Amino acid sequence: MGYSLSAMLGSHKRVSYKTEILSGLTVSVALVPEAIAFAMIAGFSPLTGLYAAFVMGLVR
């Protein structure tokens, strides 16, 4: 049941940058208001929520 490295690298597909950009914008549109709301509920400034969302984007 193991996967070989050559099998994984051999199944490389072309990247559609239009789709990648659209998915990134979609996630950011949903994430920004959520991060601001959670920060305000926790008693922090909304800017802290934006910083946290940005850092989580870098970690992922």
Image (cartoon, rainbow, N blue to C red):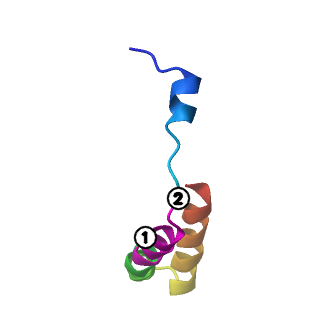
Q: Quadrant of residue 42?
A: bottom left
Q: Nearer the viewer, residue 1 or 55?
A: 1
Q: Seen in the image, is 30 located left or right of residue 21?
A: left
Q: Which secondary structure, mark 1?
A: helix
Vertical side of 33 occupied by 9: above or below: above
Q: Quadrant of residue 54?
A: bottom right
Q: Which residues are magenta?
A: 16-26
Q: CA distance from mark 2 to mark 1?
A: 13 Å
Q: Which residue is mark 1?
A: 23
Query: What residue is at 52 percent from the left and 31 percent from the top?
Result: 8
Q: Quadrant of residue 36?
A: bottom left
Q: Main secondary structure of the magenta part?
A: helix
Q: Which secondary structure, mark 2?
A: loop
**Given the image, on which type of amino acid does mark 1 rest?**
Ser
Q: Which residue is mark 2?
A: 15
Vertical side of 18 occupied by 16: above or below: above
Vertical side of 30 occupied by 14: above or below: above
* Label 1, residues with CA under 10 Å away: few <14, some 14-19, many ≥20: few
User: Would residue 41 be seen by someone viewing this image from the given angle?
Assistant: no
Position in image of residue 27 (x %, y %): 42, 72
Query: What residue is at 41 percent from the left and 81 percent from the top?
Result: 29
Quarter of the N terminus within the rendering = top left
Q: Residue furthest top?
A: 1
Quarter of the C terminus within the rendering = bottom right
Q: Nearer the viewer, residue 25 or 40?
A: 25
Q: Seen in the image, is 35 located left or right of residue 47?
A: left
Query: What residue is at 54 percent from the left and 33 percent from the top?
Result: 10
**Given the image, on which type of amino acid does mark 2 rest?**
Val
Q: Is residue 20 magenta?
A: yes
